[in-house]
Image: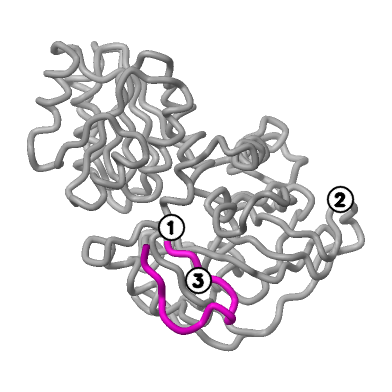
Amino acid sequence: MKAMVFQGRDHTSWQDVPDPGIQDGADAVVRVDAVTICGTDLHILKGDVPEVEPGTVLGHEAVGEVVETGNDVHGIRPGDRVLVSCITPCGRCRFCRENRFGQCLGGGGWILGHLINGTQAEYVRVPFAELSLHPLPSAVRGEDAVLLADIFPTAYEVGVLNGSVRPGDTVVVVGLGPIGLATIAAARLYSPRRIIAVDLVASRLEAARAAGADVTVDAGEAPEQLVQDLTEGLGADVAIEAVGVPQAFEACTRMVRPGGRVANVGVHGEPAELHLESLWSRDVTITTGLVDTFSTPLLLDMMAAGRLPAVSGLVTHRFALSQMEEAYDVFSRAAETGALKVVLGPPTHDAVAMSV
């Protein structure tokens, strides 16, 4: 089969690799029908995730059809249409029993495209299949569902829930890539008073307005002052860092009010300064987190019911699976190409990449 293989810093290739097979009774093999590229994949290419070894197939988000299952898999059968979660829980360890699947001690956690071969391939082996695969409702399109493999659970759990967004809150989201935009959509479920979206790219500010932001501001045009003006000098109730840049995190700590919450969602590849000399007396809560994906069944139900209308608008480019290298190029130059989320499908979609 073909797969996108990490070859070392700044080097990948779409190449032939062996087909995956069942290695454990709890495994399943899934034929990939829709897959996407995550900002974390770009962090891997930059060398920010050193655990990823050369030769690893990248990717941790996919939708597909089960083609084979191990002897211990009973709730998932060949022919089932499923969402492949970015997190793989063993279901037995202490953290899995607490729904902290991202911290799994039993051989799971974030392993696809990280510690084992991932989803940017024609087929993928999925360990702990009964907990790692989610049957798709017939009403949900694969292109939409693939965004629930990672970005929407991450935005909802690590951004909105960790940030304790409540009705009437002023929420600031810094960084308007797919995660930031999904955070805006998820925050709206809790009826905040206003959502302020911050980024440097005009097209992303426009996308934020479409996702439900009430106010948008260029990161270079004094967003901290705007937040002060809109809150009568108090500051935001919740500031969510969704880009993984130290300056963005530090700006969030300055924009939040006393007693407020800063939720860091972004993946950081270098240190950020924590100014405790100005934070210690302000009762500010700072949270971090790797997504656990405990919310995926809920989000799938909401999608099937039409309660996540912003999802489809995040897909800006579509490619055939065989165009993986082109898709990476477009996604990595998002400021130039306007790419938010790129979705790749079977070879029947070949020809020209579509932009919407």
On the image, the x and y values in percent for residue 57 come to 55, 73
73 in relation to 284, above or below: below
Q: Nearer the viewer, residue 318 or 62?
A: 318
Image quadrant assignment for residue 285: top left
Residue to which mark 3 is pinned: 53
Q: Are marks 1 and 2 in contact (CB under 8 Å)?
A: no
Q: Secondary structure at mark 1?
A: strand
Q: Few, some or many C-alpha atoms within 10 Å of disc 3 (few <14, some 14-19, many ≥20)?
A: some
Mark carried by residue 75: 2
Residue to which mark 1 is pinned: 315
On the image, the x and y values in percent for residue 306 come to 58, 39
Q: Residue at x 60, y 41 (%)?
A: 303
Q: Is residue 134 left or right of residue 45?
A: right
Q: Earlier in the sequence, mark 1 or mark 2?
A: 2
**Amino acid type of the residue that numbered disc 3 sits on in the rendered structure:** Glu
**Amino acid type of the residue that numbered disc 1 sits on in the rendered structure:** Val
How far apart, in angstroms, are the residues tagged by discs 1 and 2? Answer: 31 Å
Q: Quadrant of the C terminus?
A: bottom left
Mark carried by residue 291: none
Of tags 1 and 2, which is closer to the observer?
A: 1
Check if residue 353 falls in the magenta segment: yes
Q: Is residue 6 left or right of residue 45?
A: right
Q: Are marks 3 and 1 in contact (CB under 8 Å)?
A: no
Q: Earlier in the sequence, mark 2 or mark 3?
A: 3
Of tags 3 and 1, which is closer to the observer?
A: 1
On the image, the x and y values in percent for residue 247 come to 19, 42
Q: Nearer the viewer, residue 284 or 308?
A: 308
Q: Quadrant of the N terminus?
A: bottom right
The magenta segment: 342-356
On the image, the x and y values in percent for residue 340 come to 36, 57
